[in-house]
Amino acid sequence: MTVNPIRPTLRAWYVLAILIVVSFSAGINRHILFLVVEPLKVEMNVSDTQIGILIGIGPAILAGAGALLFGWLTDRTSRHILLAVCVMFWSAATALLSFATDYNMFFLGVMFLALGETALGPICSSITPDLFPGKSRVTANIIFAATGSALAGVGTAASGALLGWLQFHYTELPTIIQSMSYWRSAFLIIAVVGIPLALLSASIGGVERRSINASVEVGLETLKMYFQLHWKTALGLYIAMGLYSSAGNAVMSWTPTYIVRVYGMSPADVGISMGLYAAVGALSGIGSAFLVHRKLNDAFGSLAPRIMFTGAMVALLVPTLMHLAASNPTTVFLLVGTQIFFASFGSAMFTTMIQDISPAKLRGQLFGISILIMTLLSSISPLAVGLISDKFPSNPNALLWAITIVVVPSILAAVASMWQSTSSFKSTVTVLSV
């Protein structure tokens, strides 16, 4: 059995940095998509329900199956090569969004984009425990979540800035870009970045697989046996994470549109402002999670991430409900930043919680299954918001009420799922640590 080094190597930090950069690039696609809902809706003459299907159901159709496939491939192939191939695939899908001539073609591009990006979860979750031994694993997970969440906010701001620049400098751009809508050209620019990003991903090289628990040889029967013994633990965690993600997807996919629609701001201005508030909220949320985990870990051990995650979900209800009383865009941005703070605080524990219940050679598959469930549950919320909003087309606040109606029950159900699976989680951790 290979013994892990006492401290992570310089290469470990390099790999972590690459994974962060790749995740940031993948997020840019989604940020732009959420920001251009209004101009997209006008150009394609579609309803809120159709937009909900596009940004909710569309990504889930292939991403669900892709999560299982990429989880399986992660445990059996060279992870750096798999990552590089997926980067090229989602970059090609992003380019398709630039040239889609109708709703159906755009829908196809969103499906393929989500499929390629699905590989990120299993690969990142699988690699970090192999490079960061002992307590440094949790530190690496939190750093990954912290920078990822902060850069997500920066990505939203950068997306808004890119849209704004393109909108006002069209005459200075190449003819191929001037021939399309400014928001379409943003997708094309992001797609081209995928080429050097794929080469960067390949530079990670092979990473030896190590165990953080018992050394387990894994085959198909072992996977079956795992779920026979630990299905309550896994399902409870997966459902909680899925509902949590569903709530977040409803907020992040529709709040920019709500601000554009009610307050008359441009997508570019919304992206810049919302991105900056989100970046501050994310960075402070993850930083707080790091400090709180250090305090709780000594007292509660492996239960600490679950306690933090559950607490964050409960706290998230407060700013969500306060949106109903907001009367100006600045207040809305502040509340979004607060929501991101609690969301980042809780989601910082995602990877650690899954790793804690996963044998070494099953990490990719178990993370893939978690993504499948999260994707399916998350896909429902944007559609549900669109359906509710379309029922009250003359009410300017219909979209806000629709978001609230979807988000609050999702959070409450997530808390219940975590609470009921606590006992089985303790049993699973005990078995894996033997």
Image (cartoon, helix red, strand yellow):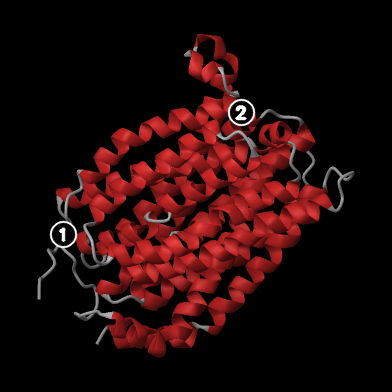
In the rendered image, which residue does mark 2 sit on? 268
* Residue 388: image location, x then y, percent: 79, 56
Check disc 2 and report its element: helix, strand or loop.
Answer: helix
Label ID, residue 7: 1
* Residue 327: image location, x then y, percent: 80, 41
Query: How many residues crowd around disc 2 within 10 Å: few (fewer than 14), some, or many (20 or more)?
Result: many
Let me know if residue 247 appears in the view: yes
Going from N to C along the chain, the mark reached first, 2 or 1, is 1
Q: Residue furthest top?
A: 172
Frontmost residue, 244 versus 306: 244
> Residue at horizontal 58%, vertical 60%?
378
Q: State the separation of the CA atoms marked 2 and 1.
A: 44 Å
Q: Amino acid at mark 1?
A: Arg
> Residue at horizontal 61%, vertical 33%?
101
> Residue at horizontal 33%, vertical 75%?
358
Q: Say above or below: 275 vs 282.
A: above
Say whether residue 206 is left or right of residue 360: left
* Residue 310: image location, x then y, percent: 54, 70
Let me know if residue 349 appears in the view: no
Check disc 1 and report its element: helix, strand or loop.
Answer: loop
Residue 296: name its quadrant: bottom left
Say whether residue 403 is left or right of residue 422: right
Pick the quarter of the image with the C terminus: bottom left
